[in-house]
Image: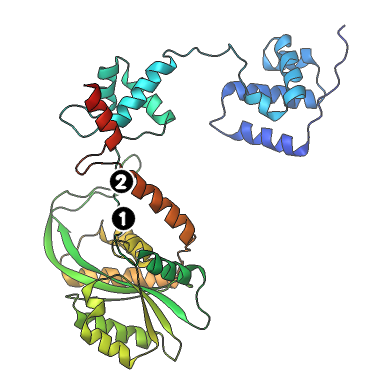
Amino acid sequence: MPAAVPPISLSATDRDEIDRWLDAQNTPQQVALRSRIVLAAAAGHSDSGIAADLGINRKTVMLWRARFAAGGLTSLWEIAPGRGRKATYDGAKIKAIVDTTLQTRPEGTTHWSCRLMAARQGVSKSTVSTIWRSHHLQPHRVTRFKLSRDPHFLAKLTDVVGLYLNPPQQALVLCVDEKSQIQALDRTQPGLPLKKGRCGTMTHDYKRNGTTTLFAALEILEGRVVGQCYERHRHQEFVKFLRTLDHEFPGPVPLHLVLDNYGTHTHPTVRAWLARHPRFLLHFVPTSSSWLNLIERWFGELTGKRVRRGSFANVEELQQAIQEFLAAWNAHPKPFVWTATVQRIEEKLARCRQTLEQIQPGSTQPRRRRRSKALSS
């Protein structure tokens, strides 16, 4: 008979981690098998008994018992050199696909697709998709941006971010803006409801039944929102909304308002009203920097959760829907917590500016790459 093998020493932390791997649905089967071998060995079972229970060779049990003793938990996920499926394409082909994706565009179009790239490189579309995923490339997607050219950008950025990260004592910070031209759209046909195997539906066409403008203020500490709808968004309506804020937040407590640079906010009539109400203190975000105003984040919530999928026969129904959303939000307000510091924002913007300086106007390719290509041709 073979000599008895001492059980593996397994800590409680390692045992819990192995149990999580076995419970997870995406754990590879080979890792799950190795984990069961280790658990059985830790329980004192013999190699022959473990092999019989799991339907594997005894040498496999001996192998993973030894590897676990030498390498611990991480060894269960490792693939020995020379094992596993061999790569179909070498590094040169992968590099060619990645470089072509980043530095060129297909003729007549703006970006590569899996099939276009596969035809160009002589590989399958699934191979292109796998390589793109491994390199975090998504040519089909695009995000929008705009770098501010405000000469006082840093001062305004520091002022607003300072309010978020270190709010003044005995004062309230309100993020104020207006969401103009909210359309009361009425779908031409009723949408089908949500059911198993099918999402809710809505028609692509609609009838316009007017618009409304929402003035809103987000109190950053509690997350409560004050909102009011008007037909237009002139300085007259803005003064009315300031009076509403004066009523909603009574007393001598100072109100710090974070605003954008829309002309309505600096109209002489508005300035005159503010001069008579010195507890209102305005803080303007830099131009082209609406992302600094947290009320824009709340406007996204309103659009995505109430307006976009709604159907409104008239403006009154739209305004009622907005008020209902406001009431539901304020019943359980949730503040948006700002975490980015001025230094982190400046570092990111510096990288963006450096990249933009290398790109020719009207192009998405860096200047140095385009020049080297022209010289080589």
* Colouring method of the image: rainbow
Residue hosting label 2: 356
| Mark 1 Cα shell of 10 Å, populated few (<14), some (14-19), many (≥20) | few
| Residue that appears at 76% across and 18% down | 66
Which residue is rendered at x = 32% and y = 73% of the image? 216
Amino acid type, callout 1: Leu
Image-quadrant location for residue 63: top right
Q: Relative to 358, is 232 above or below? A: below
Secondary structure type for disc 1 = loop
Q: Is residue 63 left or right of residue 128?
A: right
From the viewer's perspective, is 8 left or right of 277?
right
Residue to which mark 1 is pinned: 147
User: Where is 179 relative to 38, above or below?
Assistant: below
Q: Give the residue furthest to the top.
A: 1
Whether label 1 touches label 2, CB < 8 Å: yes
- Rendered residue at 43%/12% (across/down): 88
Task: Identify which residue, 375 or 124, lies in the foreground.
Answer: 375
Which picture quadrant has residue 55? top right
Residue drawn at x 38%, y 82% is 281
Point out residue 94 in the picture as x, y percentages from the top left corner: 39, 20
The amino acid pointed to by label 2 is Leu
